[in-house]
Image (cartoon, rainbow, N blue to C red):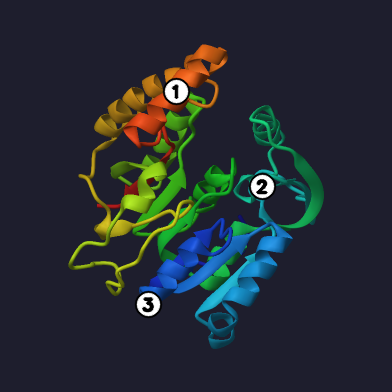
């Protein structure tokens, strides 16, 4: 990368990559952080611009509109890209053909639109390295991790939505974290976020008694539940998670027959727990 500006880390700054309807941005702002939020879907951008009009005007929030693409390996990245806007679940918007096809196999449909592209490296140089980087952009999370490689400073904490279909891709994600200097990890079931509660003493900004909605990323950093694990243990943890995916996942064995789908529906109703859920990988530099 030529003319690389080495930005400083800003302890009061969080990046919300995959803003959606602002569920996480709202939490971060209430906790006293400045936020740089990224969103590709124009309707969601408009919703959030209206919702956070005061915070944008005051400079506490900046919304970057467009889809993050790989500017590191593409010598001539496009100024716009095809975006699959999911008509049934707006959180599933993606630029990835295979992700759009997977969503359609799940019974949803897509509208194809063009959106502008975003160079994440340039944004890091412009806005600074955040204390916490949350990434959830449907198949492109790894691009944000790769963009951090040339920078001297790194976020204290990062979370991404972990791959749930390929264990090899999941292992590649963890290996990239290690290359970035992250040595401690947690696997957090995102289907249980609504049950999370802030600790009595918050180490991440103010304690605000936040009630998390479904679709939120939840707690982060020092406030996360469960113990931090080294690489070997988080890999073992994900092997167990993938065994559950194999049977109960989106394309697991149970769902391949009608009787299995009926059984799974009854099991979810009886247990009142999400089965199997999906996981975010949280990483910490020690």
Of mark 2 and mark 1, the one earlier in the sequence is: 2
Q: Give me the residue at 23% from left, 67% from top.
A: 202
Binning the other alpha carbons within 10 Å of mark 1 as few (below 14), some (14 to 19) or many (20 upward) gives some
Q: Is residue 172 visible?
A: yes
- Indicate whether 273 appears above or below 223: above
Which label is found at residue 93?
2
- Indicate whether 207 appears above or below 238: below
Binning the other alpha carbons within 10 Å of mark 2 as few (below 14), some (14 to 19) or many (20 upward) gives many
Q: Marks 2 and 1, how far apart in space?
A: 27 Å
Q: Which residue is mark 1?
A: 264
Q: What is the x, y in percent for residue 273? A: 35, 36
In the image, is 99 to the left or to the right of 109? Answer: left
Q: Marks 1 and 3, how far apart in space?
A: 42 Å
Of mark 1 and mark 3, the one earlier in the sequence is: 3
**Residue in front for this viewpoint, 110 or 14:** 110
For the N terminus, give its image quadrant.
bottom right
Task: Tell which tag, 1 or 3, sits nearer the viewer.
Answer: 1
Question: Which type of secondary structure does the marked residue at label 3 adopt?
Answer: loop
Q: Which residue is mark 3?
A: 32
Task: Tell which tag, 2 or 1, sits nearer the viewer.
Answer: 1
Q: Give me the residue at 50% from left, 25% from top.
A: 166
Q: Give me the residue at 35% from left, 56% from top.
A: 157
In the image, is 24 to the left or to the right of 227? Answer: right
Q: Marks 2 and 3, how far apart in space?
A: 29 Å
Find residue 139 and report its image quarter: top right
Find residue 222 and report its image quarter: bottom left
């Amino acid at each position: 990368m030529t003319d690389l500006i080495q930005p400083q880390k800003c302890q009061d700054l969080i990046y919300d990559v995959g803003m959606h309807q602002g569920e996480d941005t709202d939490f971060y702002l209430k906790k006293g952080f400045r936020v740089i939020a990224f969103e590709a879907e124009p309707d969601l951008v408009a919703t959030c611009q209206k919702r956070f009009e005061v915070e944008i005007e005051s400079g506490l929030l900046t919304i970057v509109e467009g889809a993050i693409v790989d500017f590191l390996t593409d010598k001539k990245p496009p100024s716009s890209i095809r975006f699959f806007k999911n008509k049934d679940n707006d959180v599933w918007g993606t630029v990835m053909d295979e992700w759009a096809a997977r969503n359609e196999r799940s019974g949803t449909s897509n509208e194809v639109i063009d959106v502008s592209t975003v160079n994440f490296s340039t944004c890091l140089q412009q806005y600074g390295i955040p204390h916490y980087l949350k990434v959830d952009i449907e198949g492109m999370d790894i691009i944000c991790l790769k963009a951090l490689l040339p920078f001297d400073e790194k976020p204290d904490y990062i979370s991404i939505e972990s791959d749930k279909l390929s264990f090899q891709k999941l292992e590649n994600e963890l290996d990239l974290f290690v290359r970035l200097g992250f040595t401690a990890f947690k696997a957090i079931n995102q289907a249980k976020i609504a049950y999370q509660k802030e600790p009595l003493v918050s180490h991440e900004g103010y304690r605000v008694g936040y009630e998390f909605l479904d679709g939120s990323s939840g707690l982060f950093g020092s406030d996360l539940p469960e113990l931090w694990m080294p690489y070997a243990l988080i890999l073992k943890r994900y092997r167990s998670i993938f065994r559950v995916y194999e049977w109960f996942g989106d394309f697991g064995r149970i769902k391949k027959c009608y009787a299995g789908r009926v059984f799974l529906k009854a099991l979810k109703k009886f247990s009142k727990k999400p089965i199997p859920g999906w996981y975010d990988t949280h990483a910490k530099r020690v």
